Image (cartoon, grey):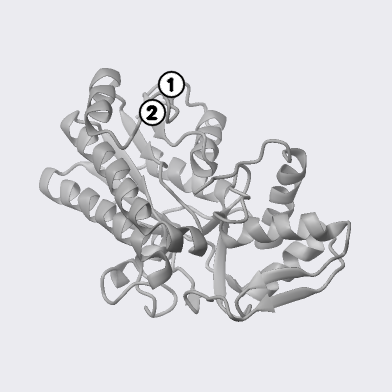
C-alpha cells in the first residue's frame, strides 16, 4: 500500500468516517473516496456490488452503521439489527468478490458479554449473553467480525476488525433522543448553562465507562492501513474508565454549568462496567493521544462552533 492507493471510506461523513478521512489526509494519502447515502444506499446489495466492481478500491474502511444510545436501540431494535447487517454484509461480500486487498471493519465494545471479566479481552467474544439494551446492534457487529475472520481464515485476505470503546469527538450526534451518553450530556449542560437549571440524567451515575476520542480511533485505523496486523480482532481503547458521575462532572466543569445534577434512578444503567484491554494493539505500536479531560475540551470547542449544523438523527 502507498499514499496513492485508492481508499474507500464507507460512512465518510459520520463522526468516525470523517475522522479517518482527516487522519489519512494528514498522513499524505491522496486517493480517498466516499459516497453519501443518497449517492449509494449501502443497504442495497446490487448497488454496493456494482460500485465496488466499478471503482475497485485497494482498501475499504467500513465506518458506516446505524448507531445510537440505549433509547434508540430500545425503540428501534429491528432497524438496528437488520440495517447494520445489510450495510456490513454488502460491503464485506463485495470486497471479497472484487479482490479488495485490505478491509478494515469497525465495530463496538458492545459485542462483548454483559458480565464478561474486566477488562474486556478479545477472547471474551461469544462467551456469555449480551447487554439487552444494545443486543441488536451488537449481534450485527459480531456477525461482521466473524465474517471478516472467516474470509481471513479461508482465503488468507487482510480483513481486520477494530473494536473501539465508547467514542466521542467532532461530528458526533448530539440529538437528545438518539445520541450516546457523552454528547447528550454535553448538550444538556450547555443548554442549561445560562439558566443554571438542574440537569436530569439517566440512571444512578455508578456504572463505569471508558471513552476514546474519535481521532485516536482514526489513528488506529491509519495504523491498520499501514501495517498488516497478525490477528483478526483488536480492541481500541484508552485502558482507563470513569464513573458516569465523574464523566458528568467533568463535562459540567468544561461547559461551565453551575446548576445541580439530578439522577433519574428509574432509568436503566446498562452494563455495570465496560473497560477494554487494548494491550494487543498497543503492543504493535498504537497508543491514544487524548486523555478524557483534554478530549472533552476539544469536543466542546467543536460543539460550540457548530451549533447551527451539528449532527442530529431522527428515529
What is the quadrant of the N terminus in the image? Answer: top left
Residue displayed at 47% across by 34% down:
12
Residue displayed at 19% across by 30% down:
99
Depicted 147 relative to depicted 277: above or below: above
How many tags in the picture? 2
Residue 225 coordinates in the image, percent (x, y): 39, 39
Residue 183 coordinates in the image, percent (x, y): 64, 55
* Among the 4 quarters of the image, the one containing residue 65: top left
**Left or right of residue 272, residue 232 in this image:** left
Residue 250 coordinates in the image, percent (x, y): 74, 66
Secondary structure beneath dot 1 equals loop
In terms of depth relative to the viewer, which is nearer, 194 or 99? 194
- The numbered disc on residue 7 is 2
- Badge 1 vs badge 2, beta-carbon distance below 8 Å: yes
**Left or right of residue 258, residue 249 in this image:** left
Where does label 1 land, which residue? 31
In terms of depth relative to the viewer, which is nearer, 13 or 57? 13
Amino acid at each position: 500500500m502507498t499514499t496513492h492507493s485508492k481508499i474507500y471510506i464507507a460512512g465518510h461523513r459520520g463522526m468516525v468516517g470523517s475522522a479517518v478521512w482527516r487522519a489519512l489526509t494528514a498522513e499524505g494519502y491522496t486517493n480517498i473516496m466516499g459516497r453519501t447515502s443518497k449517492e449509494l444506499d449501502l443497504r442495497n446489495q446490487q448497488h454496493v456490488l456494482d460500485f465496488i466492481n466499478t471503482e475497485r478500491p485497494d482498501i475499504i474502511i467500513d465506518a458506516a452503521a446505524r448507531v445510537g444510545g440505549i433509547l434508540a436501540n430500545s425503540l428501534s431494535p429491528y432497524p438496528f439489527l437488520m440495517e447494520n447487517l445489510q450495510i456490513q454484509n454488502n460491503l464485506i461480500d463485495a470486497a471479497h468478490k472484487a479482490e479488495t486487498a485490505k478491509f478494515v471493519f469497525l465495530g463496538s465494545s458492545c459485542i462483548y458479554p454483559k458480565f464478561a471479566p474486566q477488562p474486556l479481552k478479545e477472547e471474551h467474544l461469544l462467551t456469555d449473553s449480551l447487554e439487552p439494551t444494545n443486543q441488536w446492534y451488537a449481534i450485527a457487529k459480531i456477525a461482521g467480525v466473524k465474517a471478516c475472520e472467516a474470509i481471513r481464515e479461508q482465503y488468507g485476505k487482510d480483513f481486520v476488525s477494530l473494536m473501539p470503546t465508547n467514542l466521542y469527538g467532532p461530528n458526533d450526534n448530539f440529538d437528545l433522543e438518539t445520541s450516546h451518553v457523552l454528547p447528550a450530556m454535553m448538550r444538556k449542560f450547555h443548554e442549561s448553562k445560562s439558566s443554571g437549571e438542574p440537569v436530569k440524567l439517566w440512571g444512578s451515575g455508578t456504572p463505569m465507562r471508558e471513552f476514546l476520542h474519535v481521532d485516536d480511533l482514526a489513528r488506529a485505523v491509519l495504523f491498520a492501513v499501514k501495517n498488516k496486523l497478525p490477528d483478526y480482532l483488536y480492541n481500541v481503547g484508552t485502558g482507563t474508565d470513569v464513573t458516569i458521575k465523574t464523566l458528568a462532572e467533568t463535562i459540567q466543569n468544561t461547559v461551565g454549568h453551575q446548576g445541580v445534577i439530578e439522577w433519574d434512578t428509574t432509568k436503566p444503567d446498562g452494563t455495570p462496567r465496560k473497560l477494554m484491554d487494548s494491550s494487543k494493539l498497543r503492543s504493535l505500536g498504537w497508543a491514544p493521544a487524548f486523555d478524557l479531560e483534554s478530549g472533552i475540551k476539544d469536543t466542546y470547542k467543536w460543539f460550540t462552533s457548530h451549533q447551527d449544523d451539528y449532527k442530529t438523527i431522527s428515529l
